[in-house]
Image: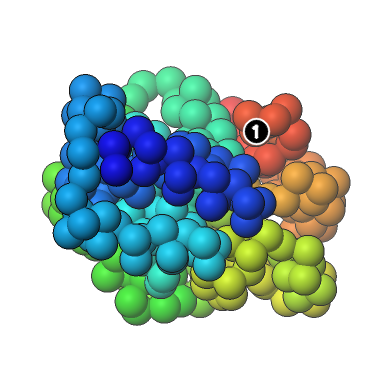
């Protein structure tokens, strides 16, 4: 069979399973199986594939048909233009989370300063490491509740040449941190238990439950982080929290309840994701 026919055949099978990105996924799966780049595939569309080559990527197609995310099958996902290793121990980085990175960078006046950044619920480390890649003198700490998750973040830091400016520690939200950070960021688990039933199988079956669900309301993580941060003797200059697209009002209200908005005069700003929906709360404590 010719390469382009093989890709078309796989795309048809994925499409029949209701996979919206069938054509793109088919190309990526075949490229991964043949260890060829997108350009090499295009240049070789009329090449005949051997039985052995077909056998190489059929298991990959079978995994995608079971709705395993592409990032798990390929073992990586690009975020902020950087390659991040992804395993079942971490949430697959989402394009919408780039809103937080962009928002923090836009708010920073001098990127050359030695900012200290803390990332609560760091997962793959994508938020913290993307910021460190843009802020050459900053250093950061990523906290997560699961040691194998931290191993993935550490290996991403190493691969990106950022290990000397980052550390990853186990902890329960911000409980182990004593403050002394300039920038606090978090994309914590924000779904309520009941919402799991509404998720696509790619997410519900493969992203870690601990990365998705925070409790019965979906707001428990923010409550815990805000309470802890409000008790620090020094408030970070900047904080940014990602939330679910229907949670802006609730998260703002919680921040107000913990006096992070209002009494301490934080300038609060909502940032929108790629679909124009409120996605990030940015709190600016600078005078
Ligand atoms: C929504 S994921 C975000 C991962 C990553 N920051 C990102 O944006 O892709 C939430 C992360 O919080 C971690 N987490 C869950 N409960 C936690 C807790 N009690 N303390 C610290 N981290 C926690 C999960 O393991 C997961 O890595």
Q: Residue 280 or 282: which is nearer the viewer?
A: 280
Q: Is residue 74 left or right of residue 119?
A: left
**Residue depicted at x 73% and y 70%:** 196
* 269, above or below 215, in the image: above
Name the residue nearer the viewer: 106 or 247. Answer: 247
Q: Give the residue pinned by disc 1.
A: 273
Residue at left offset 46%, top offset 45%: 9
Between 246 and 262, the one lying in front of the other is 246
In the rendered structure, the answer to whether residue 11 lies left or right of residue 20 reads left
Q: Is residue 45 above or below residue 191?
A: above
Q: How is the image coloured?
A: rainbow
Q: How many numbered badges does the structure rendering display?
A: 1
Q: Residues within 10 Å of mark 1 (few under 14, many from 20)?
A: some
SS at badge 1: loop
Image quarter (top left, top right, bottom left or bottom right) of the N terminus: top left
214 on left or right of 175? right
Q: In terms of image quadrants, where is residue 180?
A: bottom left
Q: Look at 77% across and 71% down and name the residue there.
A: 197
Image location of residue 84, percent across then percent down: 31, 49
Question: What's the residue at 59%, 28% (across, down)?
Answer: 287
Q: Quadrant of residue 103?
A: top right
Quarter holding residue 122: bottom left
């Amino acid at each position: 069979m010719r390469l382009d026919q093989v890709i078309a055949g796989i795309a048809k099978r994925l499409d029949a399973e209701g996979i919206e990105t069938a054509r793109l996924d088919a190309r990526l799966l075949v490229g991964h199986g043949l260890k060829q780049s997108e350009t090499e595939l295009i240049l070789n569309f009329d090449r005949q594939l051997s039985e052995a080559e077909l056998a190489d990527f059929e298991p990959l197609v079978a995994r995608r048909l079971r709705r395993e995310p592409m990032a798990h099958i390929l073992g990586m996902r690009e975020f902020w233009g950087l390659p991040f290793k992804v395993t079942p121990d971490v949430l697959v980085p989402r394009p919408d989370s780039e809103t937080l990175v962009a928002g923090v960078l836009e708010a920073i006046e001098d990127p050359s300063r030695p900012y200290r950044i803390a990332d609560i619920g760091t997962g793959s480390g994508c938020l913290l490491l993307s910021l460190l890649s843009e802020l050459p003198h900053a250093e950061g700490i990523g906290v997560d509740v699961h040691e194998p998750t931290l191993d993935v973040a550490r290996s991403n830091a190493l691969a990106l040449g950022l290990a000397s400016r980052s550390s990853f520690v186990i902890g329960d939200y911000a409980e182990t941190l004593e403050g002394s950070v300039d920038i606090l960021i978090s994309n914590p688990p924000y779904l309520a238990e009941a919402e799991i039933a509404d998720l696509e199988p790619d997410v519900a079956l493969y992203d870690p439950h601990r990365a998705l669900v925070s409790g019965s309301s979906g707001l428990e993580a923010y409550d815990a982080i805000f309470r802890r941060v409000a008790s620090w003797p020094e408030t970070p200059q900047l904080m940014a929290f990602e939330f679910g697209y229907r949670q802006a009002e609730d998260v703002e209200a919680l921040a107000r309840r913990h006096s992070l908005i209002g009494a301490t005069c934080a300038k609060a700003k909502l940032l929108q994701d790629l679909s124009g929906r409120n996605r990030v709360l940015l709190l600016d404590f600078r005078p």
